[in-house]
Image: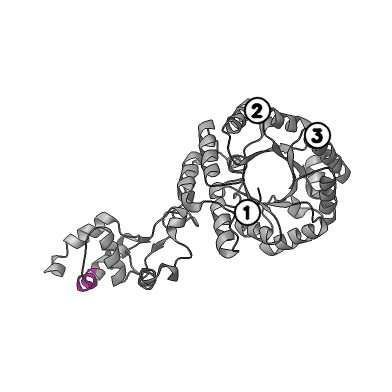
Amino acid sequence: MDNTVIIDDTTLRDGEQTAGVVFSRSEKAAIARMLDQIGVHELECGIPVMGKDERDSIRDLVAMGLNARLITWNRAVIPDIQASIDCGVKAVDISLSVSDRMMESKLRKDRSWVMGQLRSALSFAKDNGLYVSVGGEDSSRADMGFLTELMGVALELGGDRFRFCDTLGILDPFLMYDRISALRRAVPDLPIEVHTHNDLGMATANAIAGVRAGARFVNTTVNGLGERAGNAALEEVVMGLKLACGTDPGIDTHRFHEISCFVGKASGRPVPDWKPVVGKRVFSHESGVHVDGVMKNPGNYEGFDPAEVGLSRYIVLGKHSGTNSLIERYRGLGIYVSREEAARLMEPVREKAQQVRRPLRDGELRRLYRNVPRVFS
């Protein structure tokens, strides 16, 4: 794992914690296989202490012999970690509430108790040869001095990284950058992982800000599944890193649409047509100016090749279409019209589009073509 940025996908754990979502064991295996095949580096694959079905599912994944490292989520207690060991995984995340608010109102404990839990759980995990991510639940509301102290203890006891969790999705990218930068300076020898939620619509931006500030690991889920408004979306984070940051995490993106659709169906959360990166219509063009620009050079109005994520361009005919749009759209239907014919077809096409208040479908376009015989006389 020598990549500059390591993608730790948690679709099978945090993604399944989306309210009402349950993956079958076969669906979990299929999702894990696809993510492994495209080069995702780590898969957070479940919570063993939840019960026998969860443990059996995790054992199935271990038996698949994936290239990706499998990591499980655990509370920072020995029975949880033992359950993970019994499943055959070699890596664990041990989670502790690190904000004073959660310590006081959720755990009814204090900082010294949390630090004691860390020492006990981390020592047990390392004594059993595990790779350990120390997860800081509610890091975004934690005292930075306490986080620095906790990270120092984690490093001292052999922890392999620290997971900074924006558990409630309340940070903005500027604060995320500042917090991760400060922690990197304070404890430079302990790698940082960022785990972001989308409550304010900034999960992807916060994840990328964390990476730019020096985090080496980033959590994602396919389609941004997860608690409440979800997590940072795998497809958005990877493409954002590549295009906005010039950082290629080594993921084969060509199957993104395929994987997105599979997870959408398995989760009962269909992918919206306009979902960033993977929605089947995000490369749709209607405006005459835009279609003309794309036809001359796709880079005029497309930030990347649709095929890079398993999609294709789609020309829409509607109220704002121009002659070039019409010619190109009909060509896609195997109908070749001249520029003069296209100009005379524009009025009925626009009228129909305004009447139905949506893009015209193939059958409607064919009927319009047939019903305007004077165009072809």
Residue 215 locus on image (x, y percent): 70, 56
Q: Does 227 lie within the magenta span? A: no
Classed neighbour count for the residue bearing mark 3: other residues with Cα under 10 Å, few (<14), some (14–19), many (≥20): few
Q: Tell me if residue 29 comes above or below residue 316 in the rendering.
A: above
Among the two numbered marks 2 and 1 on one chain, the one whose residue lies closer to the N terminus: 2
**Mark 2 or mark 3: which is in front?**
3
Residue beneath disc 2: 51
Which quarter of the image is occupied by the C terminus? Answer: bottom left
- State whether the magenta stretch is mostly helix, strand or loop: helix
Tell me if residue 270 can be seen: no
Q: Secondary structure at mark 2?
A: loop
In magenta, the rendered stretch is: 337-345
In the rendered structure, which amino acid carries the disc numbered 2? Gly
The disc label shown at residue 127, or none: 3
| Residue at point 60%, 57% (across, down) | 204
**Residue 76 placement: quadrant:** top right
27 is higher (above) or lower (below) than 303:
above
Alpha carbon distance from label 2 to label 3: 24 Å
Q: Are the two marked residues, 2 and 3, in contact with CB atoms closer than 8 angstroms?
A: no
Q: Residue most toward the left?
A: 377
Q: Earlier in the sequence, mark 1 or mark 3?
A: 3
| Residue 153 visible in rendering | yes
Residue occupied by mark 1: 199
Disc 3 secondary structure class: helix
